Image (spheres, coloured by chain):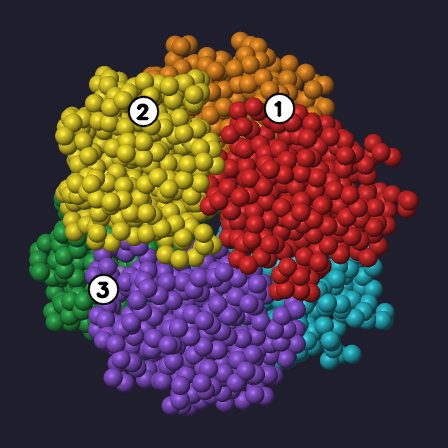
Chain colours: A purple, B cyan, C red, D orange, E green, F yellow
Amino acid sequence: MAERRKTDTKAMTQPRYTGIPTFMRVPLAGEDWSGIDIGLIGVPYDGGVTNRAGARHGPREIRNQSSFMRTIHHVTRVNPYDLVSVADLGDVLFTKLLQHPGALDEIETVFAKIKGHGITPLTAGGDHTISLPILRALAKDRPVGMIHIDAHTDTWQMFQGSKFSHGSPFRNATEEGLLDPKRVIQIGIRGAQTTADGWDFSQKSGMRVVFMEEFAEIGVDAVIQEARRVVGDGPVYLSFDVDGLDPIYTPGTGTPEIGGITTLEAQKLLRGLRNLDYVGADVVEVAPPFDPTGNTALVAATLMYEILCLLAERIDSRR
Amino acid sequence: MAERRKTDTKAMTQPRYTGIPTFMRVPLAGEDWSGIDIGLIGVPYDGGVTNRAGARHGPREIRNQSSFMRTIHHVTRVNPYDLVSVADLGDVLFTKLLQHPGALDEIETVFAKIKGHGITPLTAGGDHTISLPILRALAKDRPVGMIHIDAHTDTWQMFQGSKFSHGSPFRNATEEGLLDPKRVIQIGIRGAQTTADGWDFSQKSGMRVVFMEEFAEIGVDAVIQEARRVVGDGPVYLSFDVDGLDPIYTPGTGTPEIGGITTLEAQKLLRGLRNLDYVGADVVEVAPPFDPTGNTALVAATLMYEILCLLAERIDSRR
Amino acid sequence: MAERRKTDTKAMTQPRYTGIPTFMRVPLAGEDWSGIDIGLIGVPYDGGVTNRAGARHGPREIRNQSSFMRTIHHVTRVNPYDLVSVADLGDVLFTKLLQHPGALDEIETVFAKIKGHGITPLTAGGDHTISLPILRALAKDRPVGMIHIDAHTDTWQMFQGSKFSHGSPFRNATEEGLLDPKRVIQIGIRGAQTTADGWDFSQKSGMRVVFMEEFAEIGVDAVIQEARRVVGDGPVYLSFDVDGLDPIYTPGTGTPEIGGITTLEAQKLLRGLRNLDYVGADVVEVAPPFDPTGNTALVAATLMYEILCLLAERIDSRR
Amino acid sequence: MAERRKTDTKAMTQPRYTGIPTFMRVPLAGEDWSGIDIGLIGVPYDGGVTNRAGARHGPREIRNQSSFMRTIHHVTRVNPYDLVSVADLGDVLFTKLLQHPGALDEIETVFAKIKGHGITPLTAGGDHTISLPILRALAKDRPVGMIHIDAHTDTWQMFQGSKFSHGSPFRNATEEGLLDPKRVIQIGIRGAQTTADGWDFSQKSGMRVVFMEEFAEIGVDAVIQEARRVVGDGPVYLSFDVDGLDPIYTPGTGTPEIGGITTLEAQKLLRGLRNLDYVGADVVEVAPPFDPTGNTALVAATLMYEILCLLAERIDSRR
Amino acid sequence: MAERRKTDTKAMTQPRYTGIPTFMRVPLAGEDWSGIDIGLIGVPYDGGVTNRAGARHGPREIRNQSSFMRTIHHVTRVNPYDLVSVADLGDVLFTKLLQHPGALDEIETVFAKIKGHGITPLTAGGDHTISLPILRALAKDRPVGMIHIDAHTDTWQMFQGSKFSHGSPFRNATEEGLLDPKRVIQIGIRGAQTTADGWDFSQKSGMRVVFMEEFAEIGVDAVIQEARRVVGDGPVYLSFDVDGLDPIYTPGTGTPEIGGITTLEAQKLLRGLRNLDYVGADVVEVAPPFDPTGNTALVAATLMYEILCLLAERIDSRR
Amino acid sequence: MAERRKTDTKAMTQPRYTGIPTFMRVPLAGEDWSGIDIGLIGVPYDGGVTNRAGARHGPREIRNQSSFMRTIHHVTRVNPYDLVSVADLGDVLFTKLLQHPGALDEIETVFAKIKGHGITPLTAGGDHTISLPILRALAKDRPVGMIHIDAHTDTWQMFQGSKFSHGSPFRNATEEGLLDPKRVIQIGIRGAQTTADGWDFSQKSGMRVVFMEEFAEIGVDAVIQEARRVVGDGPVYLSFDVDGLDPIYTPGTGTPEIGGITTLEAQKLLRGLRNLDYVGADVVEVAPPFDPTGNTALVAATLMYEILCLLAERIDSRR
Ligand SMILES: [Mn+2]
Ligand SMILES: [Mn+2]
Ligand SMILES: [Mn+2]
Ligand SMILES: [Mn+2]
Ligand SMILES: [Mn+2]
Ligand SMILES: [Mn+2]
Ligand SMILES: [Mn+2]
Ligand SMILES: [Mn+2]
Ligand SMILES: [Mn+2]
Ligand SMILES: [Mn+2]
Ligand SMILES: [Mn+2]
Ligand SMILES: [Mn+2]
């Protein structure tokens, strides 16, 4: 294994409006990806949305707001940059954006390269469609479990002539053998639908679906226990669709549903998920054109920081 | 009784940014109102506001955002369109907008016609003044009970030379014998006032006033039980002023008061009010000029969907 | 020929915030398209954009703002509804939105049907990609001329793996024999490019390109004369990309370029183009998510009204 | 005549975000109105609008933005505070806001009092309806001429059951003998209408109507000469509806019309109107809820400053 | 002691968009500060911010939104204006704004004068830097306790070459002997930091630090008890940084941290702090340029009203 | 002289919402500044503003919007990247932000280093105060001429206890012998002032002041001739304050003045200033918090592109 780089955090001590906005103000990786533990990466793609586009602008604006982030976690006192080497891998570049779903192959290729370098990816979307090619790369060898926060199960069928929309990634991933549905938990589900098809697929395939009402009823602590029970010790992917939160926190998203999770609950939830065997994670569906105050991107950046701490602790503990 | 129409829900399966924005994308009724169970209707009137106008734009923007709504309720699995016939009756048209309060008569006339067709109205305001002429039509024969969510009791006296403002509809309705105050519950009341007159009227007349602090103290379940106890089995009107919610959910309103109800609480509250004897309902005080993200109208549209399910179940169960 | 309908303009006398927002508040056509002279239609498609999406929301918001429009033109005193029958044909509905460029075929099919009914279409986009399938329907029999207002020539080549983007419709249309480049004028062109390829194609194929600087130099009257000279007496299509205007008028667009045309100039320009042989027209690239005041859609609606007068006069004069 | 007060301009040298926002940061008059030459006054009334309300918030926001104003005019080098005494008279207070048009009497009463004190009023609206009661007070003794900048002639008839809307003040004023139509010029008129009735009234009664197209054709200098010719030496009122400007300058207004006057043209126009016999002036139709940048109010405040210079010079020259 | 003035509350019964926006619409004090119990004052200074400026505009916009406030508290039924005399003292005026930290001396001078008049100040900031000079005036004679709501402890060291930033006021105040750290409680603390220095200073000096997670865990009632225990019977200052609240309530602030206190919790907290020995209070860090809906200022104004009731009760009870 | 680098322009061909936003998407220079002809640099400092802060955020947002820029100029067909080597030098980093005006020394130091490398700087501000330390570095050896576009002469005296505000840089620069006032032209000046002191200083010292009214009167071509005449063949600095433009183009600025220059005029003006002996240039006063659409930053980025072409041509012609 290549020697780990030490992350340069000097930029994080400058005023937060200064300098070039990389994710968390960590260094850009450039061409050389050796020695990186965790790669922060943007996937500016929203070719699979069913309603409002704009998540293509997500990586830029999350990078911008992520300058608010700093190093030492105020609860765990973890400083992820002390534990592991973190770099901004830039954005997935496309040459086939207008060839949906062909562009998904370009995403997969990049994540296969990331995996090849032994880097754990923490991705900023983009719409939720992108989780499928990411899983195709990361779960190529064996199915993984998943903790999935979202208002929607994303296990629906065809939309407008395509199996590949942001309503379907986890149905496809299950059918392609990338996800072990018995080790999948979906949290925060809500909102009317035109058919029950997606909800039914999740439940019939064995996923644990925590509708929003159950979430409110049993509370975060119980949801944490349930999540840990479901995913167990095996490899697990974490996928956070910001529409799982209430739209007062994340108005800048394509398909908002009222009555969602609070950020304080989400932070507590994530902090309850330490030391799982993460293979990667994403925060998706940030659509800046619908986010006049920038709070959606600030929330997403803070969630990425929380997840970064989870990934760093895990990697560090395995050394 | 005329044969019930089957609601055409095909438009609800199209992308939500397409097509003509009727309420919930149900068909426009046109001239023929026969065979309709539930009429969705707009009252674009804000001639009775005491502060910021703008609720005149409410029906348009609620219609616009209501395209986010779909058919099957994710908790109850009710599909209201399977149970009853629903149509968009259009807006009340006015010829005397500048003759306040004369314009209220034009509202009453339309709702008398709705009642005459055996249609249960679900109204999008408009400011809260409109509930008075609606009750004049619907409660003409006997006083009704009411579940009233609001930051304000709306039982105040004169404002700027008129008894007919959005601060007074339920005082007038009580005095006109349209409401049975013993069967009225007001939920979410808060905010300083220059006199205690309105609060006192509500309490002296026998209304059950749940101030916000009691709401937070006893919780939604207890409020539901209290509401069911108060209104009992008799006919009941449901009136939802969106300023009952915290202004983070509904900034687009004329007289916001901080420290209000959450949407999740409101949804739970409504779902606890199934199978009451509804004569109609309204969602009022959405003022789009003060709503930069559109969330206020999205909330209002979702509340209308929740209430639609209540009305549909009730009508269906009485068949 | 079927008998012409009389357009019902009653809704146009109501307050502009009331009622269902069809284009200009003309009646919805429904299933029966007979007897219509001019069809106002939305194409909510932005699958061909190279930068910011959002034009999919254009038709809805233009319809909304078009309620500001009325009947009698203050300069020409033309009332188009006295001359011809106008209807809102609704939106092109898609079943293959995620199969770009296959969705373009669905657009073409609808416009072929419009042409089949002898209706002149006036379209609200949507991104500029849609002009290609529209021309495939309207210019199927013989090439047409075109008056094209835009910051960009839209005669560029491949973008991200596709010939079919909003940067290329008129190159494709020329190559497919739908446009007679000698009878095409492009007005308002400006902004840096990475290659000169599109500018060169336009000029080499014989199109008359009026760069913004020439426009400012020679003035609107001279541009009008030039446009009339270029297109002559033959059939002509009018395509108005709102990014031809300065972004202070139309910030809500995908690829703004500063230093553009004013609305007053655009209005004068259009009024100088009376009595050409129009086969149809479009106003495209309105992206409401980038339009906080709604002015972009108001401008687009007003341009549609101006163009409606041009089309109506022409049709009436040919009777 | 009472001794003139010296205006305290000290607040104008403080940073513009500090202090209590009176108009121009001149002192509040309080109860004692003696010794004041020019009274800046707000009329927070929009009970006569035909479309979007919000002008009730105009005075507050114009006051707020007027803190940008300073003392010495950069073209004329006039310092109005050196010439005359200026005070903020506060807002017209109402007791009958919901008794339209009765509330107009309350406006008239205040302006009668202003006139009684020998004060020349410079008013911030409010919608254009308020110019009628202002003229009833100021032109009680003899008809006056008027320079009227607006997109609309405001000489229309009934709206929604009332003669008293912002579409009719100058028809009423003419019929009531308050305006001498031969000495009235209307500048910037444009936009489609449902009837020609208002345009016809203006022209038949003898008003000089400068449509926007003529304005652009002949230029500001010619319009100035025409205005001076029309109003001559007699008493004249100046009424500036901010929708006369293009909505890019003043989006925050109730009935915007594209293709309007620029601020630079408006400033030149006003500077061409020195030394007329002004009896008062108003700037109306600023609707802050539709003005996200505050530029509409800044424009209105700057126009008020320009007019203040006109009034001050005139008063000073008559001493 | 001078005779107490009776506060004129007449303006509070007018529509809330009318009139000159003093704090709560109480009278401006002018030159004569005798007989005033509570002075509402603005400090438009943000020269100590570490990130986004804008709090200089706080006093103006809080004044503007404070017109929403009225007299009688809906929970306690206290009318502060019945108990004490309240006036708006205007803003601190500066002559050395660009001489940071010298401008702090100008603030101190004004508060020394306030103290000299026996007035209890309730201040609208400005950034949190201003609490230091306020304490220098109010705690000159003996150290005071403090209830401090904030996301940050504000006990950090140097920032960009200065000890005097909004990250350090309470470290300086402790070191200057103005605060008794054993009688200080800090509530709502959260968010990553680059060093633990500030957290450590607070805890080592003896302050009681209630991190957000503890707040959520033990609940408001327990926090109230803890606050009362910590500050005891001695003199106490209340400092409310609006970034202690979640940014959904107060997006308009310089350094937002997600996962904060709700307004309902804050209101309950304040109502649990009656009858402490207050020497003054402030509400700081409202930055209107980042507050598109105005809700941040509305929240701040409402918090000021709640605190006003606390101060008034205390003063009244001591008479 | 070091060998010139070839600018890598590959990123400019990617979709404009992707990737890390450096200025114009040119490479970041990093530590090695050799071989660079033109350095794009940000100065995120607004410690000298007299009114609204926010220009500290200018460099970030201009970088963000500058991704809209491309390579080949559509009028001149110049591709600056073919002529010279261009790099993003990052932002000036500060250690003394709160020690105004000491922080200006840190700016000067960086520009001295830039000059030492033979790099021509093109700067994005920041407020206009920064032009003084830039000139201290660039004009250290001999006074330079200046083309200055602005609403204000910026030759005023003390503000709030400091000679060093954005109202004074060019008075200080003149007094320090950095500017040759006879070779300075100020264009677009307007707006009332409390004293005539600044205007007088400019004129008395020999600067050519083109007030806005003269600009409109004589037209851009004449202004170009005048500018070329004034600055002649000697070294010249170009300083563009975006408030020189009308606030409809650049609302996001600290001290807007209505009635300004259009972008089309500004572009024409700049294109008339080819082949002067530029020593550097800046675009200042972009304050993103006041720029809801982003147009101000887009304008600034486009102006920077125009100026980049000027600088590149000049450097290339001197080789
Ligand atoms: Mn999802
Ligand atoms: Mn989702
Ligand atoms: Mn209410
Ligand atoms: Mn109400
Ligand atoms: Mn185009
Ligand atoms: Mn274009
Ligand atoms: Mn008018
Ligand atoms: Mn008008
Ligand atoms: Mn603080
Ligand atoms: Mn803080
Ligand atoms: Mn300047
Ligand atoms: Mn300037």
Circle 3 SS class: loop
Q: Is residue E186 above or below residue F124?
A: below
Please state which of residues F161 and A17 is positioned toward the viewer in this rendering.
A17
Please state which of residues D12 and D7 is positioned toward the viewer in this rendering.
D12
Residue F116: give its label: none
Q: Is residue D283 left or right of residue C236?
A: left
The structure residue drawn at horizontal position 70% and vertical position 48%, both measured from the top left corner, is: C176
Query: Disc 3 is attached to a residue of which chain?
Result: A
Which residue is the site of mark 1? Answer: C222
Query: Disc 2 is attached to a residue of which chain?
Result: F
Q: Quadrant of residue D200?
A: top right
Q: Amino acid at mark 1?
A: Ala
Which residue is the site of mark 2? Answer: F186
Which residue is the site of mark 3? Answer: A9
The quarter of the rendered structure image containing the C terminus of chain B is bottom right
Q: Is residue F204 above or below residue D199?
A: above
How far is mark 3 from mark 1, CA to CA? 61 Å
The quarter of the rendered structure image containing the N terminus of chain B is bottom right
Q: Which numbered disc, 3 or 1, marks the residue closer to the eye?
A: 1
Density class for disc 2 (Cα within 10 Å; few <14, some 14-19, many ≥20) is many
Check whether the beta carbons of the residues at disc 2 and disc 1 lie within 8 A of each other.
no
